[in-house]
Amino acid sequence: MKEIPKNMIGFSGKYFVQSMLMREGLPCAAGKDGIDLVVTLKRPRRKFSVFVVSNLQPKRAGGKGKEALDWWIPAPTAADIIACVDLSELRIWLFEHDELPRYAQQKTGSKYHLYMYTDKDVALRGKKSMKFDYEFESFKLENRVFKGVFEKRVRRATKKASKRRAPGKRATRKSRVRKPLRKKGK
């Protein structure tokens, strides 16, 4: 098989997610500034930003281990939804931004590492749950859309707004004292 450049794998995943969202009746368009897609709903009126990470096929964990899908996701991302794509079996998992720290198995300084074993004969160490692809069935695109992941309000935006000022308090604006204008020549 011919070697496929990484940027082509990324484009394939992005367009695959876009086509599947459109198939589900969710209008979306290309994003910018680190956002791959923007889903725009008319009723209820909302916008969601989507960051897409793609895998061409499962790889051996650690280079020698069992077959696994893995994605590295930047921790400081402005996206509301993270879409993880497996192009070998045409599967998409959707994670809300707030869910990522809970389900990612590793975290470096600036990235989350989410992986799923595809081989069910893996001897696990440590935490024994949420390591296999079948355990993430509820996060698949068709299941998340059915459960209404895109009908929720964007929680992160409301959290940011509530940090600015305490609820119930009105914003006060300081008035400036203007200096009188001086006429030239006097």
Image (spheres, rainbow, N blue to C red):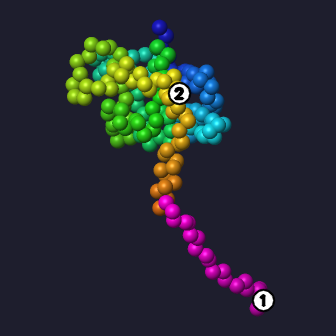
Q: Can residue 151 be spotted in the picture?
A: yes
- Residue 154 percent coordinates (x, y): 53, 42
Look at label 1 and name its amino acid.
Gly
Query: 10 Å neighbourhood of mark 2: few (<14), some, or many (≥20)?
Result: some
In the rendered view, would you say 141 is above or below 186?
Answer: above
* Residue 97: image location, x then y, percent: 45, 38
Residue 122 magenta-drawn? no
Residue labelled with disc 1: 185
Q: Nearer the viewer, mark 1 or mark 2?
A: 2
Vertical placement of residue 173 versus 29, above or below:
below
Q: Position of residue 150 (x, y in %)?
A: 55, 34
Q: What's the amino acid at mark 2? A: Val
Magenta span: 167-186
Local crowd size for mark 1, using a 10 Å CA cut-off: few (<14), some (14–19), many (≥20): few
State the separation of the CA atoms marked 1 and 2. Answer: 72 Å
Q: Residue at x 26, y 16 (%)?
A: 122
